[in-house]
Image (cartoon, rainbow, N blue to C red):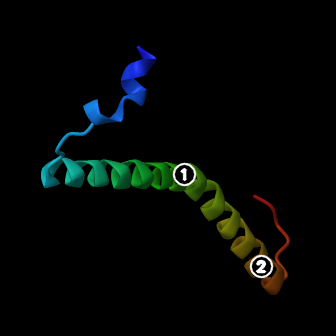
Amino acid sequence: MFYVFFDLPQLFAYIGPGMGGGVIAAIFGIIAAFFLGLWGILYYPIKRAFKNKKKKKTSSRNGNQKGK
C-alpha cells in the first residue's frame, strides 16, 4: 500500500486551472474563517475593556466616583 505513495510516475496527473483555483479559494477560506472566528471570540472582551476604561476616565475627570 505504501508503495503507491512512493511510485511517483503513477501519481502524475493533469490538474486544470479550475481545480487549482478551487484549492486556492479553499485555503483562503480556511484562513479567513480562522481569523474571523478569532475576531468573534476576542471582540466583545476587548470592546468591554475599552468601554470600562473610558467610563473610568470620564468619571475620574468629573470627580464622580460612584459605582454602578
Circle 1 residues within 10 Å: few <14, some 14–19, many ≥20: few
Residue 49 locus on image (x, y percent): 70, 63
Residue occupying the point 78% across, 72% down: 56
The residue located at (45%, 54%) in the rendering is 36
Q: Where 1 falls versus 23 (above or below)?
A: above
- Residue that sits furthest to the bottom in the current view: 61
Whether residues under marks 1 and 2 lie with C-beta atoms below 8 angstroms apart, the answer is no
Q: Residues within 10 Å of mark 2 (few under 14, many from 20)?
A: few
| Residue appearing at x 70%, y 75% in the figure | 54
The label shown at residue 57 is 2
Q: Is mark 1 on a helix, strand or loop?
A: helix
Name the disc covering residue 47, or none.
none
Residue 27, image x, y percentages:
36, 50
Task: Tell me: 6 left or right of 62.
Answer: left
Could you tell me which quadrant the N terminus lies in? top left
The image shows residue 65, relative to residue 47, as above or below, that is: below
Q: Which residue is drawn at 82% across and 66% down?
A: 66
Pick the front one: 62 or 37: 37
Front disc: 1 or 2: 1
Q: Which of 30 and 49 is in front in this view?
A: 30
User: Which mark, residue 38?
Assistant: 1
Label 1 to label 2: alpha-carbon separation: 29 Å
Placement of the C terminus among the 4 image quadrants: bottom right
Disc 2, SS = helix
Query: Would you identify the image quadrant in which residue 51 lies?
Result: bottom right
The amino acid type of the residue labelled 2 equals: Lys
